[in-house]
Image (cartoon, rainbow, N blue to C red):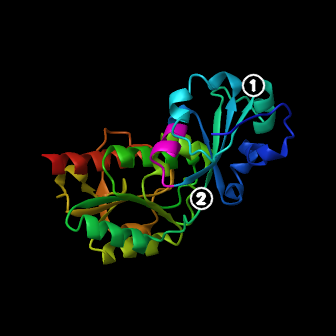
């Protein structure tokens, strides 16, 4: 594992890490993505399906991360810098002192391919989480973390969702978006149709009147849980294309955070199958 000491923020070898906050809002670093912190670095180097291009560490983090760095492939360069240089490169204080650059590679796996793979491995019982029009990185990351916690086999995102490989989404997911299969693109109705064609019952999670209370609905063997954007929720056409399911709440409350709604639904399915 080659170590390279960096003394200047304009070192061209650190181009992928320059102003990462602004790059998070654009085109995903041209086929690259950034992970931040020890937890996500551990996932990247031990169980991620994505290749590691480089690491960028504060010099004080080398010794505490020694065991983890042993998992880094030998050809991957590790750039080491003082804290002030690291902060200047990133554009804001990197208190954790840990960054890494991964390569997206062939992330264009479509929903049909993922569904086919799942059907081969788990033909009778599986769970999908499907996201439509979620543009908030925190919510997408939290949805991935919940999907991993409750045994979802994959996450499908329509083209209106933000990239689950944004730095903040990866961090909030606790690295789940680095290993949990996902497909990103297309329309919400196309996503629903693909799941139904693969034999899934789609629950459209909604507070709309007439939605069946989640406790009254039988959990099917192949279940896809569909969530809409924070605030507006799912559009009527997606709700009508699926089975509307609601979460009972106290008077005066009609909704919860989208990631919370997904967690409740997935936990319900997980418990029903475990019991």
Q: Residue at x 58, y 56 (%)?
A: 163
> Taking 115 as reference, is 182 left or right?
right
Along the line of sight, which residue is nearer the eye, 238 or 46?
46
- The residue under the point 66% across, 26% down is 95
Q: Bounds of the magenta span?
A: 40-49
Question: Quick check: is 123 in the magenta stretch?
Answer: no
Mark 1: secondary structure: helix
Viewer can see residue 31? yes
Assess disc 2: are there few (<14), some (14-19) or many (≥20) residues with their C-alpha within 10 Å of its C-alpha.
Answer: some
Rendered image: mark on residue 263: none
* Residue nearer the viewer, 58 or 71: 71
Q: Are marks 2 and 1 in contact (CB under 8 Å)?
A: no
The residue under label 2 is: 104
How far from the left and from the top, in percent, is residue 89?
A: 79, 37
- Residue topped by disc 1: 83
Q: Is residue 196 left or right of residue 189?
A: left
Q: Earlier in the sequence, mark 2 or mark 1?
A: 1
Q: Where, quadrant-wise, is the N terminus in this rendering? A: top right
Instruction: Decide: is 194 above or below 88.
Output: below
Q: Please say if 111 is above or below 128.
A: below
Q: Position of residue 167 (x, y in %)?
A: 61, 45
Side of 26 relative to 120 (left or right): right
Residue 180 at x, y percent in the picture: 42, 53
Using a 10 Å C-alpha cutoff, classify the residue at mark 1 as few (fewer than 14 neighbours), some (14 to 19) or many (20 or more): some
Instruction: Kindly state the secondary structure of the residue where label 2 is placed.
Output: loop
Up-down relation of residue 5 to residue 34 (above or below): above
Marks 2 and 1 sit apart, C-alpha to C-alpha, by: 27 Å
Dominant secondary structure of the residues highlighted in magenta in the image = helix
Q: Nearer the viewer, residue 264 or 29?
A: 29
Q: State yes or no: residue 46 in magenta.
A: yes
Residue at image coords 43%, 70%? 111
């Amino acid at each position: 594992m080659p170590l390279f000491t960096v003394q200047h923020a304009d070192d061209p070898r650190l181009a992928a890490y320059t102003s990462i906050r602004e790059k998070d809002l654009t085109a995903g670093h041209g086929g690259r993505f950034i992970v931040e912190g020890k937890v996500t670095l551990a996932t990247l180097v031990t169980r991620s399906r994505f290749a590691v291009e480089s690491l960028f560490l504060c010099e004080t983090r080398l010794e505490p991360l020694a065991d983890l760095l042993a998992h880094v492939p030998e050809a991957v360069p590790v750039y080491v810098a003082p804290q002030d240089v690291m902060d200047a490169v990133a554009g804001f204080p990197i208190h954790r002192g840990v960054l890494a650059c991964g390569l997206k590679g062939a992330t264009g796996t479509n929903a049909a391919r993922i569904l086919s793979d799942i059907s081969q491995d788990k033909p009778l019982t599986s769970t999908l989480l499907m996201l439509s029009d979620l543009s908030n990185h925190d919510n997408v990351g939290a949805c991935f973390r919940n999907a991993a916690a409750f045994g979802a086999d994959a996450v499908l995102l329509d083209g209106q969702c933000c990239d689950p490989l944004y730095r903040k989404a990866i961090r909030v997911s606790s690295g789940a978006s680095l290993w949990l299969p996902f497909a990103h693109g297309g329309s919400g109705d196309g996503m629903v149709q693909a799941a139904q064609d693969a034999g899934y019952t789609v629950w459209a999670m909604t507070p709309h009147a007439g939605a069946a209370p989640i406790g009254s609905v039988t959990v099917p063997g192949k279940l896809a849980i569909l969530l809409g954007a924070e605030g507006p929720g799912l559009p009527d056409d997606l709700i009508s294309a699926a089975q509307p399911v609601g979460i009972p709440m106290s008077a005066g409350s009609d909704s919860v955070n989208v990631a919370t709604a997904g967690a409740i639904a997935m936990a319900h399915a997980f418990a029903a199958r475990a019991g």
